[in-house]
Image: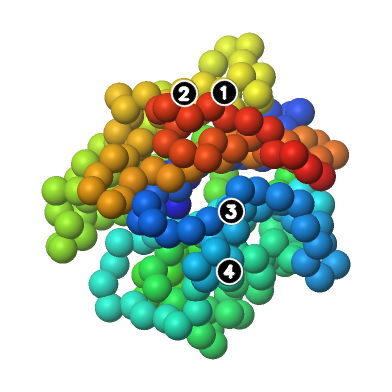
């Protein structure tokens, strides 16, 4: 996942609305989102068939979890970051998921990532850059890229041009996604989907053997019920459709 946007506590009807593109090797196998049981929870999420985890999903407690790469060198880990997403989705609140992630990072190494954990009451972004930190989000719209979030970005030495471009794209997307007067949560979700695929915001990627493989739109209402629209391909040419089974 390389572009992650969230409107948290912006809309009373839906306190968590997420729109995100997944950028990945085009030959990396995955399966579309489905509902399944995992421990005590019901989860709706796609599956990374290579490592067994997922990059985004929500559960029957109204918790949304999503991961992006964080461009930093020198971090290694045998365990997939997608499995950590699955671990977090087993928890009954974003606060409990954050506690689990912090405990895990204290005992095990992972490659770099940003991890969003959100429900109606809490939203946090964990940055694993070698010195893990958790930032509590204020209510509002937030945009997470591979080189930072909102208006706080860094330029990686090994990808300076791409890093600068990502930062520009992220700030442009943040400005565009400011809520409009009278806009509903689902209006905002649909507008975010348009930006994720319009190429003007630079977040629908097409490269040799790599690119935007899918896009996800998740909205969790005030009762903790979720809805999930999924595009199984780059959103510039792929329509979003509802996931068959939802919770």
Q: Residue furthest top?
A: 182
Residue 124, image x, y percentages: 58, 56
Height in image: 186 above or below 246? above
SS assignment at label 1? helix
Q: Quadrant of residue 205?
A: top left
Q: Few, some or many C-alpha atoms within 10 Å of disc 3 (few <14, some 14-19, many ≥20)?
A: few
Q: To which residue does mark 2 refer? A: 194
Residue 99, image x, y percentages: 66, 71
Q: To which residue does mark 3 refer? A: 31
> Relative to 227, is 114 on the left or the right?
left
* Disc 2 to disc 3, C-alpha distance: 23 Å
Question: Residue 195 versus residue 54: which sits nearer the camera?
Answer: 54
Determine whether label 4 and label 1 are within 8 Å by CB. Answer: no
Q: To which residue does mark 1 refer? A: 190
Which mark, residue 52?
Answer: 4
Q: Few, some or many C-alpha atoms within 10 Å of disc 2 (few <14, some 14-19, many ≥20)?
A: some
Residue 203, image x, y percentages: 35, 37
Residue mark closest to the camera, 2 vs 3: 3
Question: Residue 152 versus residue 227: which sits nearer the camera?
Answer: 227
Residue mark closest to the camera, 4 vs 1: 4
């Amino acid at each position: 996942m390389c572009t992650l946007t969230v409107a948290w506590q912006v809309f009373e009807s839906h306190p968590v609305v997420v729109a995100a593109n997944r950028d990945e090797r085009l030959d990396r196998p995955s399966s579309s989102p489905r509902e399944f049981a995992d421990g005590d929870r019901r989860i709706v999420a796609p599956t990374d068939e290579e490592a067994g985890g997922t990059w985004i999903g929500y559960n029957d407690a109204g918790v949304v979890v999503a991961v992006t790469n964080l461009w930093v060198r020198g971090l290694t880990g045998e365990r997939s970051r997608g499995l950590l997403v699955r671990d977090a989705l087993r928890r009954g609140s974003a606060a409990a998921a954050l506690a689990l992630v912090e405990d895990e990072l204290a005992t095990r190494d992972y490659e770099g990532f940003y991890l969003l954990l959100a429900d109606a009451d809490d939203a946090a972004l964990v940055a694993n850059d070698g010195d893990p930190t958790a930032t509590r989000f204020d209510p509002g719209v937030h945009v997470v890229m591979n080189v930072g979030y909102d208006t706080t970005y860094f330029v990686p030495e090994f990808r300076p041009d791409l890093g600068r471009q990502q930062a520009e794209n992220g700030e442009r997307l943040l400005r565009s996604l400011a809520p409009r007067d009278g806009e509903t949560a689902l209006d905002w979700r649909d507008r975010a989907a348009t930006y994720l695929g319009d190429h003007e915001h630079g977040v629908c990627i097409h490269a040799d053997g790599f690119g935007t493989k899918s896009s996800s739109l998740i909205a969790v209402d005030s009762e903790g019920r979720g809805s999930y629209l999924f595009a199984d391909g780059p959103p510039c040419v792929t329509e979003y459709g509802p996931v068959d089974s939802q919770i």
